[in-house]
Amino acid sequence: MTLLCTGAAGYIGSHTAMAFLDQTDSRLIIIDDLRTGFRQNIAILQARYPDRVEFVEMDFGNRTLLEALFKRSEITGVLHFGASLIVGESVQKPLAYYHNNVANAIALFEICVRFGVEYFIFSSTAAVYGEPDSRLIPVCESAPLAPINPYGSSKMMVELILQDLAKISSMRYVALRYFNVAGASMGNTTSLLAQDQALGQRSKNATHLIKVALECATGKRAGMSIFGDDYPTPDGTCIRDYIHIDDLAAAHLSALRFLQAGGDSAVFNVGYNRGYSVKEVIECVKRVSGVDFATQIAPRRAGDPAELIASNALLKQQTHWQPRYDDLAVIVRSAYEFEKALKA
Ligand code: UFG
């Protein structure tokens, strides 16, 4: 089976691509414009699976190039990771987010439907829920969709488009609503780390909490801000549901198998059913690394909801997915080992 993976030079895409390569015999065609992705991630996938990974450097919204790809390869399924995904940036640049996440996705859908793609796995997000009513936490898939930033709105729009498309085409889809993804591949060994052949989170300008805290712990940053300590949570800082990247990658495999077994199009949360505050995460990073670093309380960041925790009951019930690394210290340790090995 040939799968098209958009955006697999990025963090989530590269780990998921590796999971598919390790656990299936599918062939992957990866497309990525490398605006935020890393050629090194592609090189790592190709080094391990030279005959099963093809890479084409292109924008996933380029109809002409997509058409040429679909004409020459029998693509049965698509894993669509390609997107702009920074909440704060989306507030500053809404049009860029709607253009890349929605308009370009429409171009991709046109080609998928025309060429009879059967399975589509979409990277959605917890941001579609916006600021869920605290009585609805852990949040279920049936909770109202009320995004509070353009990033979340753009992902919700794509979910709605998929819903409509599935009614008029043979394409079935799973939208996975990711919560806060972190950590590095559990397959990383000391020698892979030393040779820059390990998978983990590479970022040109990191903004995600665990990544930023680890850059402090490894001396790449002098200190960091805690964005707001006046939220209605026990310690005043935002609560998120942090999920290990390998468990998230495994959810994509489970989703595809669910569709292949005849499952109807569906939407699943991917998280662990429990949350940690920003302060708890920073404490964990300090504990795991044994390094203390400076933090300061800064104003709230635009577009941040106070609390987001996933109910993962539906995913567990409908597919064979079971979390393996549901432990904040394990998540942080895997990311720390990767960060230490990563040159500045
Ligand atoms: N934070 C800080 N200081 C930092 C970085 C982050 O205090 O230097 C705080 C944020 O304000 C927020 C929390 O840490 O309260 C988590 O922020 P991240 O930037 O790590 O992640 P987000 O929750 O903003 O967003 C992530 C993904 C989204 C996804 C969302 C779902 O980037 O794609 O999780 O919960 F939608």
Image (spheres, rainbow, N blue to C red):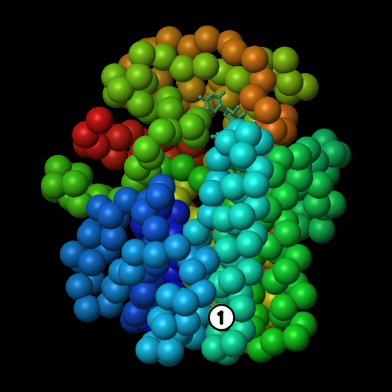
Q: Is residue 35 above or below residue 316?
A: above
Please provide percent x and percent y for residue 142: 81, 58
Ligand 1 falls in quadrant: top right
Residue 176 x, y percent position in the rendering: 61, 61
Which corner quadrant of the image does residue 264 belong to? bottom right
Q: The N terminus lies in which quarter of the figure?
A: bottom left
Task: Name the quadrant containing residue 88.
Answer: top right
Residue at 48 percent across and 32 percent down: it is 207
Label 1 sits on residue: 111
Q: Residue at left 28%, top 54%?
A: 39
Query: Is residue 254 depicted above or below 295 in this figure?
Result: below
Q: Which quadrant: the C terminus?
A: top left
Q: Is residue 194 above or below residue 251?
A: above
Which residue is drawn at the image coordinates 59% and 87% (left, top)?
Answer: 114
Q: Is residue 212 visible?
A: yes
Q: Quick check: 214 left or right of 42? A: right
The residue most toward the front is: 64
Most foreground residue, 303 or 254:
303
The picture places residue 317, in percent across and down from the top left corner, at 67, 67
Three-letter code, disc 1: Ile
**102 displayed left or right of 22:** right
Secondary element at image label 1: helix
Badge 1 local density, few (<14 within 10 Å), some, or many (20+)? Answer: some
